[in-house]
Image (cartoon, grey):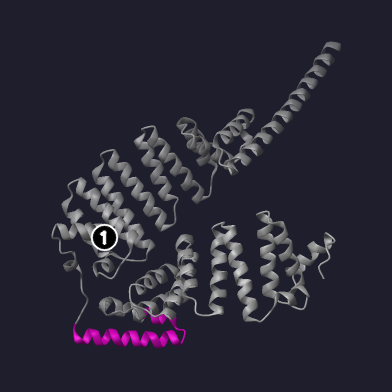
Amino acid sequence: MKKVFLTSTLLIFFVFGLCAQSNVDNERAKAFIEKAKGYAAQQEFESVAQYLQQAYDINPTLLDCNNTQLLGVAYYMMEESDSAIKFLELATQCEVKKEALAKIYIYLSDTYLETGNYIQAVKSSEKAISHTSNEKDKSILYEELANIHYDNKQGDKSIESMKKSVAHYLKYLALTEAEVMRGTVRNDALGIKYFNLTWFASSLGKDSVMLDAIVKSALCGNKDAIGYCNENKIAYKEAIIVGDTSDKAIEEVNALIKQAATLVEKGQYASAVSYLEKAHAINSTLFTGKTYHLMGLSYNMLSKYRKAIQYYERALQFDLNKKDLYFIYGTLADAYFKEKDLINASKNAERALYLSNSDDDVLECSLRLASIYSAQDDLESTIDSYQNAIRYYMKIHKITEAEVKRGNVKDKFLAETNMKLASLLNEIMRGDESDDHLIKAALTGNKNARDVLEKNKVKYK
């Protein structure tokens, strides 16, 4: 009986001891994970891998899917292929978000390629494509897949993949090859896509594919393609498919454009698009910058931003007055922003600011740029744009700094924008300036600003 009791007691102590040790180890592992996150923010991947691996060795279940993926990426950046593959493959088993899975498979494709495993590289690349919804991203991935096939002497597959890259880029631009062949498309990126297809076809002896691609590249305005065509006496302009040029067709096109303009004035944008597309199909060579402007405006008002971009970009190929250019660049910036193309959004927004005609225009442009820079995590430029917006808003409404500081101004815009600036400046450790805008936010009516100041017993009135 004593032996049984003693054995049971020892077993309990042993179990409790194990649990206590396990808890200690788990806490250590959690501390390692937190350290790894800190190093990840600084992109110190060796330290990330070191601490996450230690945590994994203690207790693999403590690494969630994000940390497993992070460990795989850290090993990828360190070019430790076997470990990268192990943890990236583990991440694919737990990740459910399609965008995240696409990124994991891109890393896996590159890593398998580094190890010479062509079959797995292709499979991973194809899985990345299948989990990608954005047409532009699909185009990029298909071009990478074309290069993988080419490097592994799979000529037909490389051309097939490059053709798919072009097709998805056309979808991204909301264009068709028929429009390219009408000679009305000018797009540098699309021209490069066709030129790259030309290169694949030429190196593999696919002459008919090469000729078709070089002509389309030239028609898109690619200078290398145009130079090649001129040197080799390829009359690419003769390939343009011209619409109906009969007097009856010209009369019909002009009538359709006139009807569309009337519909736009009435706000009937869907009907206007229908008339304009019909006119475009009959003979697009009759379209002017003003007509493409009208098409861009109609699609933009229907929230079809990719189509709006397509036609606004075409409008810019014509001579337009400063007022129209200001409107187009500003609307293009908004459309690119909606499409999450922040580089083109900022470029066009800056062009609109340069062409601004009034204080109201500058205010509008400054707020637009603040939103774009904020999305790019460019805090300094975001702050500059908001400060510029405040300056011009006060100028327009004839409000002085002295009036604000005396508490004589209650204004929603100033209250909200000063509060945004207080937060942004605090984030980049510009404390004095942050406090100044916090006080202005409180004085102009922001309740949150008042609460913060009163909580910290700061006198601002």
Q: Quadrant of the N terminus?
A: top right
Question: Is residue 250 found inside the magenta-colored segment of the image?
Answer: yes
Task: State the residue at coordinates (40%, 57%).
Answer: 136
- Can you name the residue that lies furthest to the left here? 233
Name the residue at 41% across, 40% down. 109
- Could you tell me which secondary element the residue under label 1 belongs to? helix
- Is 161 on the left or on the right of 106, as rendered? left
Question: Is 116 situated above or below 260?
Answer: above
Stretch in magenta: 246-274
Vertical relation: 106 (above or below) 136 = above
Q: Quadrant of the C terminus?
A: bottom right
Tell me, yes or no, if residue 79 can be seen here: yes
Image-quadrant location for residue 210 = bottom left
List x then y, in percent, for residue 460.
81, 67
Q: Nearer the viewer, residue 406 or 264?
A: 406
Percent position of residue 131, x then y:
45, 50
In the image, residue 93 lies in the stretch drawn in magenta: no
- Judging by the rendered image, the residue that carries numbered circle 1 is 223
Left or right of 100 in this view: 215: left
> Residue farthest to the front?
402
Percent coordinates x, y for residue 217 in the rendering: 26, 60
Vertically, is 321 above or below 219? below
Q: Quadrant of residue 65?
A: top right
Task: Specify the quadrant of the image occupied by residue 169.
Answer: bottom left
Answer with left or right where residue 164 lies relative to residue 263: left
Q: In the image shown, does 289 or 69 lie closer to the viewer? A: 289
Residue at (22, 57) in percent of width and height: 214
In the picture, measured across the screen, residue 307 lies left or right of residue 74, that is: left
The secondary structure that dominates the magenta segment is helix
Q: Is residue 303 visible?
A: no
Which amino acid type is marked by label 1?
Answer: Lys
